[in-house]
Amino acid sequence: MAESVTVKKKLSDFGHKLFGTTPGTGLQPKEAIAYSITGFGQNLICTIIGSYLTIFMTDALGFDLNSKIGAITGVMAVAYLMLATRIFDAFNDPIMGSLVDKTRTKWGKCRPYLKWAAVPTGIMTLLCFLPFYKQNLASFLVLSFIYVVWSVVYTIADVPYWALSTAMENDTEKRGIFLTVARLACTVGAGIVTILIPAITNGVTKKYKINESHIGQYIEGIGIIEKSHVNLVLPEYAAQNAETLRWTYFICAVAIVVVALPMFFYGFKNTRERFQTNDKPASFGHNIKLLFKNNQLMLIVLSGILGAARMVYMYTGGLYFCKYALRNEGLFGILTLLVIPGGIVSSVLVPWFTKKVGKKWTFIGSHILGGVAMLVMYLVGWQSKAGMVVAVMAMVILGIPQGFSNIMTYALIGDTVDYLEWKTGERAEGICFAMQTLINKIGMAVGAFIGVIAYGMSGISPSNPAGSMTDEGLKKLWDMLVLSGVVSMFACIIPMFFFTFTEKKQKEAIAELMARKLKQNHNLILDYAGDMNAIEKYLDPGTFNILMMKKEGQAPAHDLLDYKTIKVFDETILLNEDKTEGASEDK
């Protein structure tokens, strides 16, 4: 029993040390862990849709260059669907954010959506990957409608999830630490899906592909089989290959939903909202006005939009490149693994860089490094051994800006919530963090669109890749994926030069805000884990002394009275004492 208590205490102490929290006061490790677990589950679902729905439609359902949806090819229809739906979904985020800001429940305004949206999100995810869709206009329209509904349902969970971080903790350093852990959990969740699914689909369809025994044979539609054709689908097995892919993606979706949904409920149950306003909910129009008053947030949004294509190689385009140019879609998982070391190192170093360099300059510097690495990768090319070595090194380096951005963007938006409250007296976490999900979805929209467009421009047919691929087509695929990333990597840093709400200013703003609140309610000091000296300059000496005594459990009996009354009363006593002493001297 004693050993169990000791282990429990050691784990508790480790948790507090990891998250920089104080036992019994403010954010607790259990909450930060629950928040991270929810992010892990959420990213399992987000990644299978974001990375694999497109290739499910083109290669499994057959909406490719050889099919027609109305007047355009199937692959172009998929490209436009991805772009339109995700941009529509992105601009739904401010509406959802405004709804969050209007929400008032006994659980808070962010947490309940984790509970309410979990099951609908799971159901819509499964409907997206049903294996029964046909290669016709009706199926395309039905799937398009389901995908739009999925995007709306997912938004109902996603926007409140990220807004919840500012309601849990308002100290920028502590929030940065627990967001670092949460983003690492999200990265692990996304990484598992990204690595496993291509490996699974490549394995189950291997029997339908050209192998080394076919080299030198003549196959209709291809010609003489060469070594470069190995691991591409044989035309005679195209239908069986597509059918197998349909069922494989569906089974993977079922497994992901079963694992992920309980994590939403776990996050709901084990988190707490501490910082929120009980003011009358603002209208949507008012929240939109607040957005534009938050000029620091607008700079982050602009940076995110300009950087939408910087990670295009991590979306569908990278999967197409691995499947056809490198002849092995399972390599997409390795491509993702190459980014992870740099991403993990930079993620772990976020708190250190935040203190020593600041979030703004870390973001700028890391993206300059990433842009240079990507430019070198493009100039060297990929067709030689030297080119592949350079590409591998560049991918490792590209993990650095990705790791910093994944965490710092959320932390920066959290800071802008504090900036807005300091400037206007209103927090509006929901609509502010809706901008983060808007950025993410625009990135996914642009990434999917560029990837599918590049795939279409390459001229590759999934039913006969060996007979349709050319060197020129593969070069177009490479150019689109890498050059768009180079331009986007450099473009996204421009707005950040104008970002001025630094860590120092954020701490000063938080101290001033807390001082304002403490003047209204002395009891808030009991849950305040920040620096007391920081708020002292915003309070008169009497109020500050009363608060210090209350925090130490020594509050005077008159601490609930108006301080001005106490001050007058005390001065009157001193005056009477002075008069008494004077009278004694006269006598």
Image (cartoon, grey):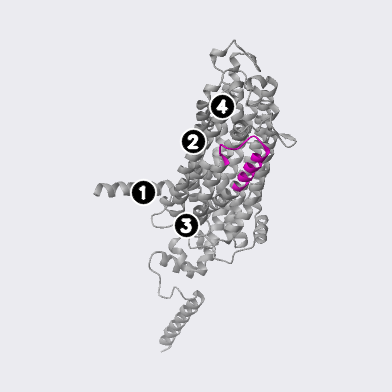
Disc 2: which residue: 192
Give the amino acid type for the residue marked by disc 3 in the picture.
Asp
Q: In the image, which disc is placed on residue 531?
A: 3
Q: How far apart are marks 3 and 1 (CA)?
A: 21 Å
Q: In the image, which disc is placed on residue 240?
A: 4
- Direction left: furthest residue: 1
> Disc 3 or disc 1, which is closer to the eye?
1
Secondary structure beneath disc 2? Answer: helix
x 56%, y 24%: residue: 328
Residue 120 appears at what percent x and percent y?
53, 50
Q: How packed is label 1: few (under 14 Cα within 10 Å), some, or many (20 or more)?
A: some
Q: In which quarter of the image is residue 325?
A: top right
Q: How far apart are marks 2 and 4 (CA)?
A: 27 Å
Secondary structure beneath disc 4? Answer: helix
Q: Please report the bounds of the magenta region as a residue range.
A: 128-149
Give the amino acid type for the residue marked by disc 4 in the picture.
Gln
Residue 146, magenta (yes or no): yes
